Image (spheres, helix red, strand yellow):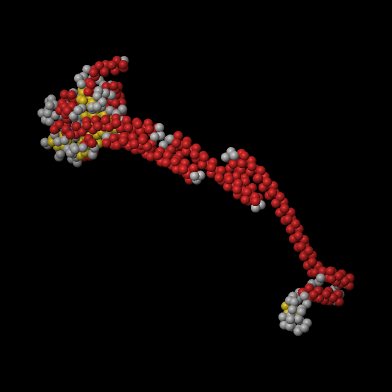
Amino acid sequence: MKRLVFLASLVILSSFSGIGGFCSQEKTRILFDDYHASCRPSEYLVDISTELKNRGYIVMPWDRQIDFFLLSQCDVFVVFIPSESYFEEEKEAIRKFVENGGNLIIFGDYGDYMKEKNIFITINSISSIFGIKFNADVVLDSEKNREGEDCHPTISNFKRHPVTEGVKSIGYICGCSLTLESSATALAFGNSSTTANGQKGEDIVVLAVAEYGKGKVMAIGDQDFLVGSRTPGYEEDFLSFMDNKKLALNMFEWLSFVYKMTIEADELASEGHRLFSQRVYSQAKLQFEKAKKLYLEANMTEKVSEMQGMIAKCDKALDAETAYQKGMEYYSKKEYDNALTEFQRSKSLYDEIEDTKGSDKTQLMIDKCGGALKTLIAEAAYQEGMECYKHHEYDNAITKFEEAITLYEELENTEKAEELQNKLQEARDKNATKNRIFVIFGIFAAIVVVYLTVRMFVRRSKISGGSDILHLEKVYCSSCGKENIKGISYCRHCKAPLKSLDELEKEKILEDVSKKFISGEISEGEYHRIMNELKESL
C-alpha cells in the first residue's frame, strides 16, 4: 500500500509544470500547502509568490495530502492558516522533514477567526511539535497603529537577527500572539502600549523561530501582512505597508540561505568527523572551523556549539600529539622523568577525547619509562649496596640488596635478581660473623669490667674491714714543720720531700690497729692477723 502511495505521489508531482526546476538542487524550492489551508495561498499570496519567483525561487502549490517523500523534494514548506486537520502520518512527515534539515513557515491569524474556521486546533497540532503555540487572542495597540485601528498595531520592537535585518516597523493586521517554549526564540515583540489577552509590551511575541534537528521553523501570528494589490477580495495593499514586504522576503531568504548553508556546513562537518575518526586532527579542525562559520552565519546556535566542541577536541588531540613527541625526545635522551611527565599528559588528553589508539601508544611509552626508571633505581640500590659491602656496613648492604632484588623481580630480570641473591647471602653471612665477634667481645669486656669492679670492692672491703682509717686532710713537713695538703710530693714551703699517700695511710692504719690492741678492743691473734693482711694489701 505504501509503495502505491509513493508511486502516486511521484505521478502527481510530475504532473506539475516546471517539475524539473522544482527538483533542482541549485534553486530554493518552496511548497505551499493549498490542501489544508482555509484559503488557497497560491491564489491569496499572488504578489509575494511573484516576487519570490522573480528572485529565482521555485514556488509550487500542493492541493493533496502530504507525505515525507513529497516534503523531501522541497527546501521550505509553508503551512498557511490550515483548517483541514492533518493526519498523524502527515504530522510525522512534517516533523521528520524539519528534523532532517527542512524548513517550515507557519502563518496564523487572530483568535476568533481561527476558532471559527477550525484553524486554532489544527495549526497548534503542527506548531506545538516545535515549541510554538498560537494563542486565541488578537494583538491590539491604542497608540501605535494604522489609521486609528487598534487591531492594526505597528510593531517596531525586534530582536537582532537576519530575518529582522533592515526591518524597522511592520503593520500587524489582525494577528494573534505566540507562546514559546525554551526551544523557540522570539524575534518581534509588542510595544509598551501593545496588549493581548492580558499581556502587555514585550511579553507579547508576534514572530518567532525555533531550531529542530537540522531544520528551522518560523511562525508569525498574522497572514494579512502578506496581502498585496492582486489578492482577491482585498482593497488594500498591506504587503507594501511599512517594511512588511522586507520582512516577508527576509523570512524566505533566510530559510533558503539556512538550507543552503546547512547542506554545505553538514558536508564540512561530516568530513571533519571522518578525519577525526581517522585521527587526522589538524585537517579535521579546519573542516569543523569552516562548518562553524557557516552555521554561525545561518544563526544555528546548536550546530555552532557542536562544532566548537569538536574544535576543542581537535585542539586537545593536537596537544596530546605534541606532548607525545616531546616525551619521545626526552626518552631518546634517557631523561625518563621528563619523558614520563609528557607521556602522562598526552595520555590524559587522549583519554578525554576517547582516542583509544593514542591512549594505548602513550601507555606503552609510560610503561617503558617506568621500566627504565625502575632499572635505574635498582642499579643505584645495587651500587650503594656494594659500597656498603666494601666498607663492611653489612646491615645497610643487605637493605640495599633486598631493595634492588625486589625491583629486578618486578622487571622480570631473573638473572640479575639471582646474582644479587648470592651477594645478599654473602652479606648476611659476613654480617652474622661480625655480629658474633661483637657479641664475644662484649661478653669479654663485661667479664673484665665485672672482675675489676669485684676486685676493687674486695680491696676496699679489706681496708675498711681491718680498721676505720681516718683520712688525713693535711700533713706537716718533717723539715720545716709547716702544714701541707695531703698527697703532694714536696713541701710547698721548703720543697723538702713528703711522704707518699700510701705511706701516710699505712702509718695511720698501723697506728690505729696498735691503739685498738693496746686498749683491748682486739685480741693479740686478731692484731697479728690484721697486721699480716695490711702488709699483703699495702
Please provide percent x and percent y for residue 120: 23, 27
Quadrant of residue 455 in the image?
bottom right
Q: Can the viewer see residue 123? A: no
Is 81 on the left-hand or right-hand side of 384? Answer: left
Is 252 on the left-hand or right-hand side of 534? Answer: left
- Near-viewer residue (414 or 263): 414
Which residue occupies the extreme front position in the image? 333
- Near-viewer residue (490 or 149): 490
Quadrant for the C terminus in the image: bottom right
Quadrant for the N terminus in the image: top left
- What residue is shown at x 86% (from left), y 75% (from top)? 517
- Near-viewer residue (400 or 37): 400
Is 145 on the left-hand or right-hand side of 429? Answer: left
Please provide percent x and percent y for residue 365: 49, 39
- What residue is shown at x 47% (from left), y 36% (from top)? 361
- What residue is shown at x 32% (from left), y 30% (from top)? 267
- What residue is shown at x 25% (from left), y 36% (from top)? 186
Which residue occupies the extreme bottom position in the image? 480
